[in-house]
Structure formats: structure tokens, C-alpha cells
Image (spheres, rainbow, N blue to C red):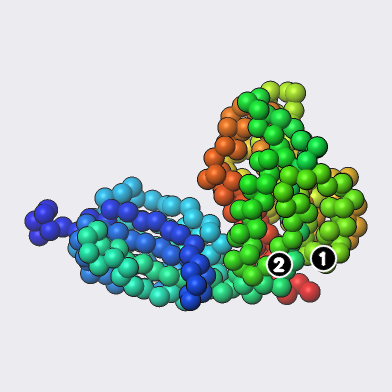
Amino acid sequence: MSSLTMVKVTNIWTAVREDPGINCCSEVHIEANLPFRYRVDTAPRLVRVYVLGATANLPEGKILVRDGLVGQIEVRNYGGQVEVEISLEHRSTADILWTRPQMPARLTLRFDRQFLRVLFGDKVVVIDPGHGGRDFGYRGPVNLWEKDVVRHTAHRLADILGRCGSTVVFTRSGDETVPEKRRIACARENGAHVFVSLHTHWSANPRVSGPAVLFNPLGPGSEEMASLVSAALVEKVRLRPRRSRADPFLRLLGPVPGLLVEVVTISDWVEEGLLRSSRFHQKVAEGIFNGLKDYYCKTRGRG
Ligand SMILES: [Zn+2]
């Protein structure tokens, strides 16, 4: 085969898709310079796509996805073909279709995210964007205010949970002052399965940085949830976490499981800068969601 007609896999990317008329799904797209022949092997939680007579025109190795269903994708050149191994975190069925038969050719695998609806569909999540109104929270060195940045993360998190069928309630919808007691009452009145308060940390010590996940010591499972959320958050944002601990404000929740996520340390120049990126807010939201998902998976059937 001449190099002109050799198939080159040029790009592999993923997206979570929710359009009217189709179930919410995770998509994996495999693009090449030409339409290609392929073979698919499936096993529980694993799908391998072999692109035949092809080479990978992208780096071999692992791509971390963690979108709630697709865990990672590994790309390998292997005996004149490209192997794309998709690891799933849960069982799912895949539809395989050409979404772009012309050049560049694109094969799309569409994985049903129904399992996440089973896991989250019955959950009420109260999201508490910290501060607001006259209460500005902490300020970063280049003038970002905590009360503003946490709202961005809150909306991203609500979007992800909403797509999984959760009922999401905000303790504040705009820039209003909300007393702590009102926030707590919101969780209790709505029968929250979990209360997630969003904040940033601040420190006069320039060496202090990173996120931390605090928990309600009176809420069953909250400590375990905090440690899973912290791990999943760090996996997404790639910052070194600070230590998890019990939080006095969250005690007011009584038996309602609760977390207080300090998404970054806003006094750190670099971390304040991250808050200007909408991609970063998305990553934080995905991290928190993944941690909650890990917790609900683990405790499923524990009664
Ligand atoms: Zn705060």
C-alpha cells in the first residue's frame, strides 16, 4: 500500500451528548484521513476497535476521560493496525455509526449513560454557591471574588447532575445575600441526599495552595464521600490537595450528608488564574460529580 492511500488515524476525542430524541450518551470519535475498515471486540466494560491497515498519527498511550462512563482510552499501533481500547466504568451498550463518511472520516461509538440515571435519578442535590450579595468571600491577588467564581462551578455541576436526572436545588440563584441558616434550611426542606457547598480557600502563607474537601461529621458517609470527591477532583484538576477535615458549618446540617469543596486556594496567583477558565470550572464540576458517583456506586446495595 503506498503512503498516499495509507489510513492514518488523526484524532480521537470524546463528548457527552444530550440531544432531544436521543438518550444522554458518551461518544467516542475516531477520525482518519480516509474512510477505513474496522473490527470491534466487546467485553464487559471494554470495547476494542481495530482500525485495519492503518497507523496512528497521534501519540500512542492513554487518554484519561473519566466522563462518568468512559474511563480511559488507550491507543496503540499494532501489526499494521491501530488498536483503540475503550475502558468503561460501568456496563453499557454501544451503537457504532459513521457520523462523517466523507473526509476526514469519523467513526462514532455512542455509549448509553442509562446507568448514571439509575444512580442519580432519585437524588436531590442541594448546591450551595458560597457567599453572595454583600458577602464577597475571599479575593484573589488579581481581583477575582470568591462569590462570583463559585457560581460558575455550581452551574456546571448542576448541568451534569441534571443530565443524570437528579433534582438540583440552589441555595442562591443570583448575587444575593443568603444567611448560613437559610442555606442549611434549604437542604433540610428539600430532603437533600447531599449538600454541596462551593468555596475557595485563602491563606496569607504563599506556600499554601490546592483544593480541599471538607465534610459534615454528623452526616452518614460524608467523610468517605469527601475522600472520594477529593481523589476524583485532584485527578481532573491535577493540583495537590490539602487535607480533608470536618467542617463546623456543615454540622448544622445534622444527619444530612454534606461536603464543602474549596475548589482552589484563591490567594495563590496560579490557582486564581485557573478560575478565569471555563474549562477549569468544567473540570472541577466533573471531578466533584465523579467522586459522588464513586461514592454512590460503592454504597449501592449497602442498604
Ligand atoms: Zn468561602
The residue lying furthest to the left in this view is 2
- Marks 1 and 2 close (CB-CB < 8 Å): yes
Q: Which mark is residue 94?
A: none
Determine the secondary structure under disc 1. Answer: loop
Q: Residue at position x 60%, y 38% from top? A: 275
Q: Which mark is residue 190?
A: 1
Q: Which residue is mark 2?
A: 167
- Locate residue 14 relative to residue 197 in the image: left or right: left
Q: Position of residue 300 (x, y in %)?
A: 71, 71
Asked if residue 123 is positioned above or below residue 33 in the image, the reply reads: below
Q: For the residue carrying disc 2, how many other residues have a C-alpha within 10 Å: few (<14), some (14-19), or many (20+)?
A: some
Identify residue type, mark 1.
Asn
Asked if residue 45 is positioned above or below residue 224 in the image, the reply reads: below
- Locate residue 46 relative to residue 52 in the image: left or right: right
Q: Is mark 2 within 8 Å of ligand 1?
A: no
Q: Position of residue 291 (x, y in %)?
A: 66, 56
Q: Position of residue 43 (x, y in %)?
A: 44, 74
Identify residue type, mark 2.
Thr
The front one of 229 and 249 is 249
Q: Specify whether residue 79 is in view.
A: no
Q: Residue at position x 80%, y 64% from top? A: 192
Which quadrant of the structure image shows residue 77? bottom left
Q: Earlier in the sequence, mark 1 or mark 2?
A: 2
**Rounded to the nearest whole Å, what is the CA distance between mark 1 and mark 2?**
10 Å
The front one of 277 and 28 is 277
- Locate residue 103 relative to residue 168 in the image: left or right: left
Asked if residue 113 is positioned above or below residue 174 in the image, the reply reads: below
Q: Residue at position x 57%, y 49% from top? A: 282
